[in-house]
Amino acid sequence: MNKIKIVVTGGPSGGKTTLIEALQKDMTNKVSVVPEAASILYRGGFPRKFSDAGKIHAQRAIYFTQRELEELIVSESKAFALVCDRGSLDSIAYWPGHSAVDFFKSLNSSAAAEHTRYDWVLHLDTADGESFDSTNPIRTENHDQALELNSLIKEAWKGHPRRVIIPHEADFLSKIGKAKAVIQKILAGASHS
């Protein structure tokens, strides 16, 4: 049986890290987590440049690192499912001009090819202004920029046949609970097919 591959995505301060930490704690034997490639690269010293060339090289590095991480964990994990902290199409939101055409051309890929890499996409919307977390040392966006990225990431994943969007809620734990319930339903349905 093939592993189910679920992308957890969304704008900055949407709850991705909290959800993934909860899944690691509560579903240890069922899921393996693919860590966020951007965090690995930036924490490791990959230059964070805001020129067009800097963005292109960073997003290409993130894309290829993401692919290799996914393939490594698929080959070594005994878990039933992979939960990816972001997916390949997130990079479009950070690409100069947000051009999907240029992104796919640069990587010799397509939306259809990237969609087939993932069984499910779970998008967690960015928090409102009062709940926005600006304490992440890798996060460079303010709340307005985070909302724009949230919209661009939604657009990048538009057309995926199995995408669930979890909107912001004032009760953050309720939002995480709903997202966790979606993943539990995906896993329960997949184990019966």
Image: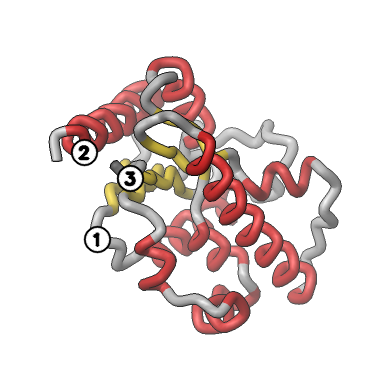
Q: Amino acid at mark 3?
A: Asn
Q: Residue tagged by mark 1?
A: 161
Residue carrying label 2: 190
Image quadrant containing the C terminus: top left
The residue lying at 54 percent from left, 68 percent from top is 92
In the figure, is residue 179 to the left or right of 59? left
| Count of numbered marks | 3
SS class, disc 3: loop
* Label 3: how many Cα within 10 Å (few below 14, some 14–19, many 20+): few
Labelled pair 3, 2 in contact (Cβ < 8 Å): no
**Residue 126 x/y as whole percent:** 46, 44
Q: Which badge, 3 or 2, comes first in the chain's sequence?
A: 3
Q: Amino acid at mark 2?
A: Ala
Q: For mark 2, does the 10 Å Cα neighbourhood hold few (<14), some (14 to 19), or many (20 or more) residues?
A: few
Q: Residue at x 35, y 63 (%)?
A: 116
Task: Work out how far the residue at label 3 is from the one at label 1, CA to CA, in angstroms.
Answer: 18 Å
* Front: mark 1 or 2: 2
Distance (Cα) linking label 1 and label 2: 16 Å
User: Mark 3 sits on what residue?
Assistant: 2
Q: CA distance from mark 3 to mark 2?
A: 10 Å
Q: Nearer the viewer, mark 3 or mark 2?
A: 3
Q: Is residue 192 above or below residue 42?
A: above
